[in-house]
Each structure stands twice: as C-alpha cells, then as structure tokens.
Amino acid sequence: MHEVGVAEEVLKTVLSIAKENNASKVTEVVLKLGSISGVSADALQFAFDAIKEGSIAEGAKFQIDIIKAVGVCADCGKESIPDTFFSICDHCGAPTLEIVAGKEFEIDYIDVE
Amino acid sequence: MRIDIKDKVLSKNDIVANRLRERFAKSGTFVINLASSPGSGKTTLLEKLLPRLKDSFKLAVVEGDLRTENDANRLRQVGVNAVQIQTGDACHLEAAQVESLLEGINADELDILIIENIGNLVCPASYDLGEDLFFIMLSTAEGDDKPAKYPTIFFNADYFILNKIDLAPYVDFDIDRCVRYATDINAELKIFKTSARTEEGLDALADEIARLATEKRATLILR
Ligand SMILES: Nc1nc2c(ncn2[C@@H]2O[C@H](COP(=O)(O)OP(=O)(O)OP(=O)(O)O)[C@@H](O)[C@H]2O)c(=O)[nH]1
Ligand SMILES: [Mg+2]
Ligand SMILES: [Zn+2]
C-alpha cells in the first residue's frame, strides 16, 4: 500500500478532531491495524513521523497496535490464526475459515492537551 | 485529555469509491475491476471476450497503464468503446481517475463497465474503484505458486481468471496446484480457466458476465 497517503489521512483526521476539541497539542495517537489490512505498520510509522513535523501533532507519540488475523471455522468452530491460507482451518483442515479479525484500520484514541 | 475515536479511517479513495458505487447502483451499470501482473493477457482477453457481449450490452472499458494509449486503441479496433488513463508512474488506479472519465463514456447509460487496472499484484488490492466485482487474473507463464506469494489480492478478489492455459504444458505449470493455493486463500473464489489465444473458456466467461450484468440491471426494475 501507499503508506504516506494513508498517514496523511490519519493526520488530517487527528488534526480535525483535535481542533474540534480546542486542543493546542496532540501528545499521543493510537491506531489499531489489522495484520491483513494491506497497510505496513513500519512504513506507516515512518511516514507519520515524517509528515507530523510542523503540525500540533509534531511531538505526538504514534503507537500502532497490531490486531492479528483470526478466523473461525464453520465446520469445527475453532479459531485459527492464518498467515497465508486464509480459508484453511488449522485444526480440521477444512476450507471454511471465516475471517473475523485482521482487516481493521482505525484510530483508537488520541491524547491531547 | 483522552478522546476516544474508534472509527475506521476512511481514505479519500474510499469516499470517492463509495460515491461511484452509488452512482452505478442508480444506473444499473455492472462494473468489473480487472487486475493482474503486467502481461497476463488482460487486454487480449478483453479483445476476444467483449465482441461476444457488445451486441447485447452497452459496454465500455477504462484502460490503465503508466504510458501509451496502446490498450485503448486495441479495444477500439475491435469496436469496443475505450478510454485510456495514463498514470505516469503510479502503480494502481484510483477511484478519482475513474470518476473523471465517466462523462466522456456516458457511463450512466452503460450496462457493463470494465476497468483494466495497472499490471501489479500488490497495490490494486487496496484501492476500491467502486466496482461490483474484483477480478484477479494470473497467467500460466508466471508460475503456479503466485497466489501463495501474493495472498492479499487473491483474498480480496471475487473471481480468478487463470489465463494462457494453452501454455501450461510448456512452462511446467500445475493448474490444479495453482487452483488449490488460490482456494486455500479464498474458498469463495469463482474460477475460470481461459486462453485468450485459442479462445478456450471464453464463451463460459462471457455467459457469466452477461448473467451478472443482467442481474444488476434487474435490481433497477425491482426498486
Ligand atoms: N499463448 C498465449 N498468449 C497470450 C494469451 N493471452 C495473452 N497472450 C499474450 O501475452 C502478451 C501480453 O498480453 P496483453 O493482453 O498485452 O497483457 P496485459 O495483461 O493487458 O498487459 P498490461 O496491460 O501491459 O499489464 C501478448 O503478447 C499476448 O498476445 C493466452 O491466453 N495465450
Ligand atoms: Mg493491457
Ligand atoms: Zn475446523
């Protein structure tokens, strides 16, 4: 994915919420990022740190909480953590895994002053 | 002070793509986003496939490439309405680029719009173009383990077109193995095996697209 563009969307959202709340400074931004969301955490971290300069989020700590992909098997009901074969159950091998987590990309919360 | 947000980051692209999807719902236009690596045979397939559909459906193609108007010209030569997007150096199409061309092709009067994305197995997976269905194409010359190496795009796809099956024996491509990789990633994938060269499999694919487009049209009448 193109993490600079994504980081810009995050920063824009953060700045507008901070403004709505009359904040003068953003001190922390916490994101939830699914492991199969298509966004690379390292690249996003790097991009955010580069573009926050000069904004009221300049000093903000940017934390990314990774949410591992989880699938639930429609056959045996057990949970798997798939890495590549997203439809295969780790327990019974059935191709009936439903992905229930791992595609998230959301701002969890921000701390402002 | 802590501000809870817990909200999905909706990118600029998502906003435009949602607007496109609403527009295509109103017009009843069935939209396919077709992606593959460079040279899998997207344009050749469309050249052979669309003449089968163009008498029954009003259709158009949006062609994406970094440079040249070649692909749009190839489709015009077989009587298909096509417009070209040249992205310069960008490796995927974005919804805004598609939106900017819609007036030129009278998009609201179309039954079928096919968007041929830039050849790339990574980035197009992350950019919604407002399509009904996402088609991923692979050709046998690329190796049968490609789905396992690029799982995200196969996971996000609805249809998998395996093209150049005429070449499979010459390039030691194990079709069953490739299909197994793909369905292990996405069990819901609908699979069509084609050769744009011998035209094997093209009638079946044309019938499927005709069925899907007719279904989408019917949603207009039901409303
Ligand atoms: N043998 C064989 N060759 C094919 C087939 N389909 C396409 N080709 C050839 O593959 C080459 C690339 O085809 P294109 O249709 O230009 O591929 P594309 O995916 O549109 O390429 P880009 O738009 O550049 O990403 C051409 O030389 C085609 O003649 C096929 O089914 N069998
Ligand atoms: Mg092409
Ligand atoms: Zn199971």
Image (cartoon, rainbow, N blue to C red):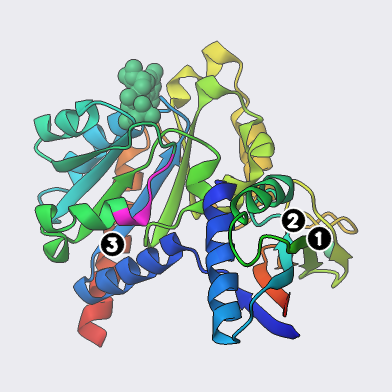
Counting the numbered discs, the total is 3
Looking at the image, residue A43 sits to the left or right of residue B222; the answer is right
The residues tagged by marks 3 and 1 sit, at their Cα atoms, a distance apart of 34 Å
Q: Compared with residue B188, is residue B138 higher up or lower down, i.e. above or below?
A: above
Which amino acid is tagged 1? Lys
The residues tagged by marks 3 and 2 sit, at their Cα atoms, a distance apart of 31 Å
Residue B56 visible somewhere in the drawing: no
Q: Which residue is mark 1?
A: A68
Q: Secondary structure at mark 1?
A: loop
The extreme top residue here reads B170
* Residue nearest the observer in this picture, B138 or B207: B138
Q: Quadrant of residue A104?
A: bottom right
Name the chief secondary structure element in magenta: loop
Same chain assignment for discs 3 and 2: no
User: Residue visible at 27% across and 37% down?
Assistant: B46
Q: Secondary structure at mark 2?
A: loop
User: Residue visible at 67% across and 79% down?
Assistant: B6
The residues tagged by marks 1 and 2 sit, at their Cα atoms, a distance apart of 5 Å
Same chain assignment for discs 1 and 2: yes
Marks 1 and 2: CB-CB under 8 Å? yes
Looking at the image, residue B216 sits to the left or right of residue B57; the answer is right
Q: Compared with residue A19, is residue B37 higher up or lower down, i.e. above or below?
A: above
Q: Which quadrant of the rendered structure holds the C terminus of chain A?
A: bottom right
User: Residue visible at 67% across and 72% down?
Assistant: A107
Q: Which residue is mark 3?
A: B30
Q: Which residue is mark 2?
A: A35
Q: Secondary structure at mark 3?
A: strand
Same chain assignment for discs 3 and 1: no
- The part of the chain drawn in magenta is B92-96
